[in-house]
Amino acid sequence: MKQGTAVALGNFDGLHTGHMKVLQAALSSSGDGVVPVVLLFDCHPLKVLNGSEPPYIMTQQDRDSLLHDMGFVTVTESFDEICNMSPTEFVDGILCKKLNAKTVCCGYNYRFGKGGSGDTQMLKKLCGERSVNVIVAKEQMADGESVSSTRIRKLIESGDVEKAGKLLGRPFGYNLTVIHGNKNGRQLGFPTANQAFPDGFAVPKYGVYASRTTVDGKTYRSITNIGVRPTIEDTALLSETHIIGVDRDLYGEKIKVELLFYIREERKFNSLEEVFLQVREDIRLVLVK
């Protein structure tokens, strides 16, 4: 890049509060011709290193949109190529030559170079020799434990989206296209916006959640069922959201659903009438909270 940059380094696979410390450091180091940049990879490093990648907490589109809203320029590199570089080659070829870095920001446990041979101390040494400033963000803690994407995934998969939201710094959610369903919700008087999770996404524990949903820039209270609807013996995994106060055709639109807290497990009812009574109670609970 022609302009100098303040580069945020890390595996930004969730943009949680720990990641935000690194990103804020890069933003604070930008200005006066220095552009804030995030270095991203074309895949999760574990896909190259171990042959499989963990479920992702947010879609790439949502991640990039949030970064751009914060003011970052995103640069994506092939991890398959970068992982074979020595620490010196990475600093010279990527940080200095390609990105024209003036400041580099990373987390306390950042590793780089082939086999993860470089750590923050080596990064400071190599960058210092090239007049590049290095800022290392401290470990971010919550309830006595380090904030990490792994920890957040486990919380989501166990249904504890409330705690996951605290670690993320925002509610866990997804911005996905509304698809056609079997219209059982509408027959019951509770129409739902149905969304299918993309492959590889961190699917929350099956059950009913209090949620909030954004449609056309306006946010509404809602309830969301995640699962396979055992009462009607369906097998397709869906997120089904009843948006309180909205009753219009949303098919083909992208809407943002954020899960606030877990209400109950998904279960099989004896009749659709029982489903109606339970959903009515679920809505009452959401409205009084």
Image (cartoon, rainbow, N blue to C red):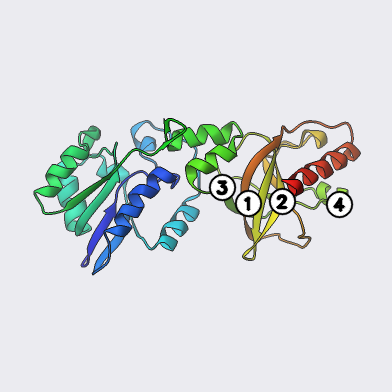
Task: Inspect the image, locate mark 1, and give the three-letter code of the amino acid beneath it.
Answer: Val
Query: Can residue 43 be seen in the rendering of this structure?
Result: no
Residue type indicated by callout 4 = Gly
Q: Secondary structure at mark 4?
A: loop
Q: Are marks 4 and 1 in contact (CB under 8 Å)?
A: no
Q: CA distance from mark 2 to mark 4?
A: 14 Å
Is the residue marked by circle 1 packed among few (<14), some (14-19), or many (20+) residues within 10 Å? Answer: many
Q: Earlier in the sequence, mark 2 or mark 3?
A: 3
Closer to viewer: mark 4 or mark 3 = 3
Mark 3, secondary structure of its residue: loop
Say what amino acid the circle numbered 3 marks: Pro
Mark 2 vs 4: CB contact within 8 A? no
Q: Nearer the viewer, residue 33 or 111?
A: 33
Badge 1 marks a residue whose secondary structure is: strand
Q: Residue at x 77, y 31 (%)?
A: 267
Query: Is there a contact, CB below 8 Å, between mark 1 and mark 2?
Result: yes
Badge 2 crowding class, 10 Å Cα cut-off, few under 14, some 14 to 19, many 20 or more, is: many
Q: Which residue is mark 2?
A: 222
- Looking at marks 2 and 4 on the same chain, the residue that comes earlier in the sequence is marked by 4
Q: Which residue is mark 1?
A: 257
Label drawn at residue 171 = 3
